[in-house]
Image (spheres, rainbow, N blue to C red):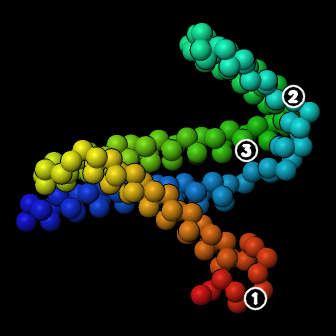
Amino acid sequence: MNQVIAWAGFFGAWLLVAGPLYQGAIELREADVDRDAIEASTAGVPRPEPPSAWWWWLLPPAMYLIRRRRRSAFRRAALARLTQAQREQFSSFINKASGWFTVAVGATLLAAEQTWEVVDRYHWPVSLFWLLAIVMLGVSVLNTSLRMIRDERVTGSGSQQPGEGLA
């Protein structure tokens, strides 16, 4: 019975990863964001130039700070060009994405623990832990991708003929 519970915990934890990934993708796709208008509004804002690669070699923390400062300046300039409604849409979208990403990362950490418990129970090598974790994370992402593609076909978001995508 202990083995059954260990495997149930393993699969349950990985379902807790796949669920938020899929739910987040659905909610972000359905978010009421006028992407074209936002892109048009920010088209004139020049993208920040990447700092010299020498910074990575000489002072990696300085490279991080330089990059962060440039991205921050770009974000401020881009947001300044948006209307209030566009800023609200953008903020809502980012908040939803951050929330679902946080839930998925937390679930991934719990799933890593459950994966370790299974590997430890059977005295399998550590490399199998990493293999299982990578495969299960890949399956979770693949599940979301395939379901989103199927949903697009079913709802007719693509350019299919009537009746296609129902198979």
Task: Give the Cα distance between marks 3 and 1.
Answer: 33 Å
Residue 120: give x, y in percent of width and height.
Answer: 16, 48
**Closer to us: 102 or 46:** 46
Identify which amino acid the numbered label 2 is placed on.
Pro
**Closer to us: 2 or 128:** 128
User: Is the residue marked by circle 1 packed among few (<14), some (14-19), or many (20+) residues within 10 Å?
Assistant: few
Quadrant of the snapshot with the N terminus: bottom left
Q: Which residue is mark 3?
A: 89
Residue 81: give x, y in percent of width and height.
Answer: 87, 31
- For the residues labelled 2 and 3, say whether their Cβ atoms are less than 8 Å apart: no
Q: Residue at x 76, y 81 (%)?
A: 160
Q: Earlier in the sequence, mark 3 or mark 1?
A: 3
Give the answer, above or below, for where 142 lies relative to 91: below
Identify which amino acid the numbered label 3 is placed on.
Gln
Q: Which residue is mark 2?
A: 46
Closer to viewer: mark 3 or mark 1: 1
Residue 26: give x, y in percent of width and height.
Answer: 59, 60
Q: Residue at x 23, y 57 (%)?
A: 9
Whether residue 152 appears in this view of the structure is yes
Q: Which residue is mark 1?
A: 162
Identify which amino acid the numbered label 1 is placed on.
Pro
